[in-house]
Each structure stands twice: as structure tokens, then as C-alpha cells.
Amino acid sequence: MKREVERLLGCGITKEQFEEALMYAERKQIYIFKRTGRKEVLQEQYLAKLAEEYAKSFMFSKLTMDLCRLQYEYGKRASYIFM
């Protein structure tokens, strides 16, 4: 399934990224099935799509945090230079 998630994403992900996304996707899959009773929710392709969504979300969050840290560090250096 990792390859399918990577295909949907259009890029590779680490085993850890995949496992974290899959864990959350499985929880959401069960939640949706309990709420709706729709059997198509239990299909592997549905789970892969949910995992792709979580992986994408986690990747975006990491990128955002990295950019914030970079901006913070740059701001600290810039203020030190101009003092």
C-alpha cells in the first residue's frame, strides 16, 4: 500500500511517514464506516486515499514549521547584526 500512497502523492515518503499516515487513516476509515455503514469505505483503495490525505497534511505541517523556524532564526540573526 505504501507504493500506492506514494503514487497518489506523486513522491516518495519514508516508512515512518507512511506508518503514521496509515495509523490515522485506519482510525478515520473505521469512524466513517461506523457512522455511515457504507461497505465501500472498507476498500483498500479508500484506505490508500485516506492515508495519502494524512501524509500530505503531515508533510505540509512539517514544511510550515520548518519555514517558521527558519524565519525565526533569520530574524534573530538579523536583529543581532543590526544592533
Image: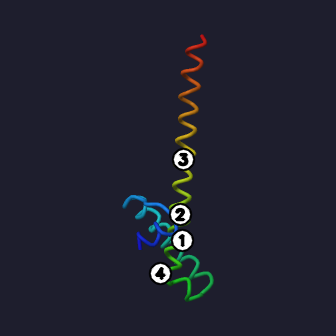
The residue singled out by tag 3 in the image is 63
> Hey, what amino acid is under mark 4?
Glu
State yes or no: discs 3 and 1 in contact (Cβ < 8 Å).
no
> Hey, what amino acid is under mark 1?
Leu
Q: Which residue lies at the image location 50% right of the left edge and 68% below the top edge?
A: 51
Which SS class for mark 4? Answer: helix
Check disc 3: other Cα within 10 Å, few if <14, some if 14-19, many if 20+: few
Q: Which residue lies at the image location 58% right of the left edge and 38% below the top edge?
A: 68
Closer to the chain start, of discs 1 and 4, is: 4
Closer to the chain start, of discs 4 and 2, is: 4
Check disc 4: other Cα within 10 Å, few if <14, some if 14-19, many if 20+: few
State yes or no: discs 2 and 1 in contact (Cβ < 8 Å).
yes
Residue 50: assigned label: 1
Give the quadrant of residue 72: top right
Q: CA distance from mark 2 to mark 1?
A: 6 Å
> Hey, what amino acid is under mark 2?
Tyr
Q: Position of residue 34 (x, y in %)?
A: 57, 82
Which SS class for mark 3? Answer: helix
